[in-house]
Amino acid sequence: MKPTLQLKLSQHLTLTPQLQQSIRLLQLSTLELNAEVERLLQENPLLEKADEDETPTPPPEFSMEASTATPSTESSSDERDERTPGDFDLLANAGGDGDWGSASGDDDEENFSPQQVATSSLRDHLNAQLALCNLPLRDRQIVSALIDALDEDGYLQTSLDELVELFPAELGLEADELSDELSIGLRRLQNMEPSGVGARDAAECLGLQLKSKPATTPFLAEAMRLVEQHLPLLAARDFGKLKRLLHIDDAGLRGVRALITSLNPRPGAEFSRTEANYVIPDVVVRKVRGKWTATLNDAAMPKLRLNRIYADILTRNRDSSNQQLAAQLQEAKWLIRNVQQRFETILRVSQAIVDRQRHFFDHGDVAMRPMVLREIAEILNLHESTISRVTTQKYMLTARGTYELKYFFGSHVATDTGGAASATAIRALIKQLIAAEDRNTPLTDSRIADLLGDQGIVVARRTIAKYREALQIPPVNLRKTM
């Protein structure tokens, strides 16, 4: 075949640099946007912050900091914080959720930025106690090595045999001799504060704390026996079997259980440094003249403008020597326009969400209606991918808390009347039913499904179990009390 030249006309879409930047800025979170803007401010001399000497004042609603967690996890965290360590937590040794701090005040002198409280670590706390002990150097080194092997909760997860192999051979110690010295060092460590530190498991941790109690403590002997031999039964809440094994009645078992749940299964947790994550909401929702209205949060919007000095130079001198500055001027204009367009799009989407979910703002989660991205896309004449970008990592401050925009979207469940109920509303109903249940005879998943069916909401038992687990609510056997 002979090579030939042919002309062909075709049409195709090409993303301009400006459009690419607009799409990228739209999918960034507020923190990522601010970081991107700071980077561009350093690279482009034509761009500068407006009102450089002034700090944008947040609206009054921000006097209380809001958590980034979704309401379902917030509510379950509150439940965990309000209760004492539950029986089902003793074996899991799960990490607790930190409380979200808040600050308010009208006096400028008292408006301090959040500061991390300086606290000593568990290792520092134990080494300070070790320094006060009159021990030989070798014993001090062994206890120090055990302290270094503790995890954040104060447990010794590494076995003593494994620790023996970590000691250098220069010490000239036989394995058996070193193992004995490690056992002695572990007993010294377990006598330190906080009580329970250095335990190998939850049973040993609780046992150490019980041994530190006065001998006159009520139900101490029964509690010690339960912890050492029958702790899994307490975690499973098999109260009948526990009463038979411990030879006690209901009142005695309540006393034993109260004593054990007053202990701390994570003695080292109070020394761990946890940092709370905060967000600045992009949108604030208020009720104005009886209608819920979304407005942009000025504190989340970067204040940008062109540098007038460089702009005037380019206006007076339009020769080819200023091509680089001209390109940077165009980039600065694109950025300012794209940032403004980003927040305008967020506001449009937020207002559409508020209009569709107005009953939620009046009555809470139980009034949430099912909604998908396509509905908002059709209302605003935008693509679903744009709505997805807008609702990801963008937050809305309401009278009921701070929510990610994606929270307002969810699947639906059919009702007997031919309508649909939102999955969020069903989770709220499940939470209400469990909160009002008789703790002596808690509701099973099947019973909850029947109660929802009486309200016209058809939900399978497996779906109830899935929603209950999402709410971090334990199963029926772990919710039973005496």
Image: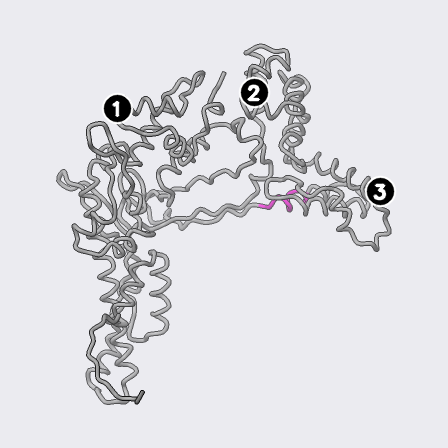
- Marks 2/1: CA distance? 38 Å
The disc labelled 2 sits on which kind of residue? Answer: Arg
**Left/right of residue 349 with respect to residue 132 in the rendered view:** left
Task: Residue under label 1, please give it.
Answer: 455
| Residue 466, percent from left and from top | 40, 34
Q: Dividing the picture into quarters, in which one does residue 235 lie?
A: top right
Span of residues in magenta: 120-128
Q: Main secondary structure of the magenta part?
A: helix
Residue placed farthest to the front in the image? 1
Q: Which residue is tagged 2?
A: 257
Front-most of residues 428 and 74 = 428
Residue 125: within the magenta?
yes
**Residue ID at (59%, 40%):** 153
Spot occupied by residue 154 in the image (x, y as percentages of width and height): 63, 40
The image quadrant where one finds the N terminus is: bottom left
Cα distance between the residues tagged 1 and 3? 69 Å
